[in-house]
């Protein structure tokens, strides 16, 4: 200590300067260094230690928010996180309208009863659909999401407008039900427990089909057989037939990807990549 | 420090990979907060750190350089962002006093004597307190070298001094720390 502290008062170069440099650079201090230096070195080690601080974690959220705002349009990871939420809502709304219309069409079953089954059915559908779509189109931009949104909204409007005239099992509601059913079926998720799906089975029987699959094979996508031309006045300009064809194509790809996906648990990806 | 992976992590963060950016943040932010604590003594060090990151994010896509340059850039941003030389001096004493008063709170287990704290458990807070007893320049230079992990040249550019002056300042700071420990009768 004597040499070390004396160098303080004299203010000239001290033979332990190399040791000081080593300490500053985080290199190990030689055993033969002055005792005081070991004490200071311990202090520096404590300075380097990273405390687990809750406040710093909130700082991370703020930093990531700033990052998202700046890189929102080019961040694939970010879009994978955001798309499911948006699609869930949209698809849920569409399916809800389709199911409600279907239940009314089948007659005698209260809409309130149908409302009780919507969350399960809608969620199944949304999960299976969005769990595949981002994987199949990892490079889609936010613009594509908007296109989908426009189309979905239009579909919902069409379906809702059709409700008063009581669309039957070959109407737009059946298409929505069939789509939901096909995804629920693929996952082996007890679709039969849903009233709406039971109604679908009933409609299939009434139509003389062997089973729901056979029945759904006969269901035409709404708007593609000219039966909904009365609703064209409500369509936004963008929602033309090209959009519909594109959407049908996407749905087809998504369906195939769902079945052919090599990823384990692809069917539940919609939930697994949520934080 | 991230090390060999740094270039690829940075590149991914610059392309919009959020996880890569989170890695960058995680690697630097603890040091950033501690550095700000040493040089500003502001209660809202975390706010200054957060503001720093907002600025860094804005310039991230244009940044070019290795990890040392990256760290130097982040700390330079922090310095510009939250540190005003005059403000820093006036706040130093009051902040330190309040910090000691806080430690003297009987509700706390930590004793008020910084050196005693060091003796019992050399935790980061205690070490930071000891460093704040140095002159502002000594404290900042040591924080930049030890906490930020910058080399002499980077620190020299950051504080606007020559490398030689930075070296001498750091050494004096370390000796002063040893003196404080010795005076307190602390043997480690």
Image: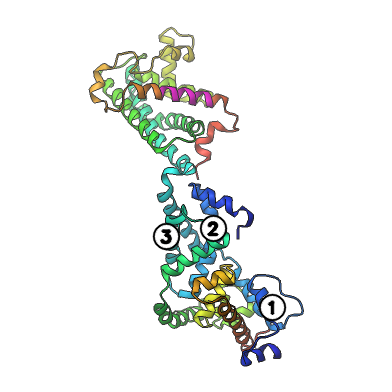
In this rendering, is residue A27 above or below A129? below
Q: Chain of mark 1?
A: A
Determine contact: label 2, label 1, CB under 8 Å: no
Image coordinates for residue A263, horizontal then vertical, percent: 59, 32
In the image, A44: left or right of A126?
Answer: right
Residue at which label 1 appears: A18
Residue at which label 2 appears: B65
Query: Which residue lies at the image location 45% right of the left edge and 80% below the top edge?
Result: B92
Q: Residues within 10 Å of mark 1 (few under 14, many from 20)?
A: few
Q: Residues within 10 Å of mark 2 (few under 14, many from 20)?
A: few
Query: Which residue lies at the image location 37% right of the left edge and 26% below the top edge?
Result: A114
Q: CA–CA distance between discs 3 and 1?
A: 37 Å
Quadrant that contains the N terminus of chain B: bottom right
- Seen from the viewer's position, the closer of residues B183 and A104 is B183
Residue farthest toward the top in the current orientation of the protein: A208
Q: Nearer the viewer, mark 2 or mark 1?
A: 2
Image coordinates for residue A161, horizontal then vertical, percent: 26, 23
Residue at which label 3 appears: B55
Q: Which mark is residue B64?
A: none
Q: Is A249 within the magenta?
A: yes
In this rendering, is residue A235 above or below A67? above
Image coordinates for residue A110, horizontal then vertical, percent: 33, 24
Q: Residues within 10 Å of mark 3 (few under 14, many from 20)?
A: some
Helix, strand or loop at label 3? It is helix
- Give a yes or no on whether discs 3 and 1 share a subunit: no
Q: Which residues are magenta?
A: A247-257
Quadrant that contains the C terminus of chain B: bottom right
- Seen from the viewer's position, the closer of residues B26 and B123 is B26
Q: Nearer the viewer, mark 3 or mark 1?
A: 1
Q: Is A189 within the magenta?
A: no
């Amino acid at each position: 200590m004597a040499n070390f502290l004396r160098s303080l008062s004299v203010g000239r170069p001290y033979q332990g300067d190399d040791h000081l440099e080593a300490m500053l650079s985080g290199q190990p201090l030689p055993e033969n260094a002055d005792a005081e230096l070991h004490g200071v070195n311990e202090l520096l080690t404590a300075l380097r230690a990273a405390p687990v601080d809750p406040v710093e974690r909130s700082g991370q959220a703020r930093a990531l928010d700033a990052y998202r705002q700046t890189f929102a349009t080019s961040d694939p990871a970010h879009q994978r996180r955001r798309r499911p939420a948006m699609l869930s809502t949209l698809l849920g709304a569409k399916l809800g309208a389709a199911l409600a219309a279907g239940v009314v069409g089948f007659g005698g079953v209260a809409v309130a009863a149908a409302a009780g089954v919507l969350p399960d059915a809608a969620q199944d559908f949304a999960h299976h659909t969005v769990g595949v779509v981002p994987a199949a189109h990892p490079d889609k931009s936010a613009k594509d999401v908007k296109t989908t949104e426009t189309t979905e909204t239009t579909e919902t409007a069409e379906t809702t407008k059709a409700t008063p005239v009581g669309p039957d099992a070959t109407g737009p509601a059946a298409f929505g039900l069939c789509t939901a059913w096909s995804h629920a079926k693929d996952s082996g998720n007890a679709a039969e427990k849903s009233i709406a799906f039971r109604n679908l089975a009933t409609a299939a029987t009434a139509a003389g089909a062997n089973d729901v699959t056979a029945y759904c094979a006969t269901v035409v996508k709404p708007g593609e057989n000219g039966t909904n031309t009365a609703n064209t006045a409500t369509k936004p300009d963008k929602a033309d037939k090209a959009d519909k064809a594109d959407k049908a194509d996407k749905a087809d790809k998504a369906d195939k990807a769902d079945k052919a996906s090599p990823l384990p648990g692809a069917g539940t990806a919609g939930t697994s990549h949520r934080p | 420090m991230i090390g060999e992976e740094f270039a690829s992590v940075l590149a991914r963060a610059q392309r919009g990979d959020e996880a890569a950016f989170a890695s960058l943040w995680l690697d630097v932010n603890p040091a950033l907060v501690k550095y700000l604590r040493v040089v500003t003594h502001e209660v809202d060090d975390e706010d200054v750190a957060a503001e720093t990151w907002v600025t860094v994010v804005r310039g991230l896509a244009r940044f070019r350089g290795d990890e040392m340059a990256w760290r130097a850039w982040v700390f330079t941003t922090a310095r510009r962002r939250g540190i005003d030389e005059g403000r820093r001096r006036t706040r130093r004493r009051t902040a330190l006093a309040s910090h000691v008063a806080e430690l003297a709170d009987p509700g706390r287990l930590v004793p008020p004597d910084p050196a005693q704290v060091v003796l019992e458990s050399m935790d980061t807070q205690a070490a930071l307190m000891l460093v704040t007893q140095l002159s502002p320049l000594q404290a900042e230079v040591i924080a930049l070298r030890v906490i930020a992990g910058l080399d002499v040249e980077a620190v020299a550019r950051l504080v606007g001094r020559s490398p030689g002056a930075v070296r001498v300042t750091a050494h004096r700071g370390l000796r002063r720390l040893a003196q404080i420990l010795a005076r307190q009768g602390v043997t480690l």
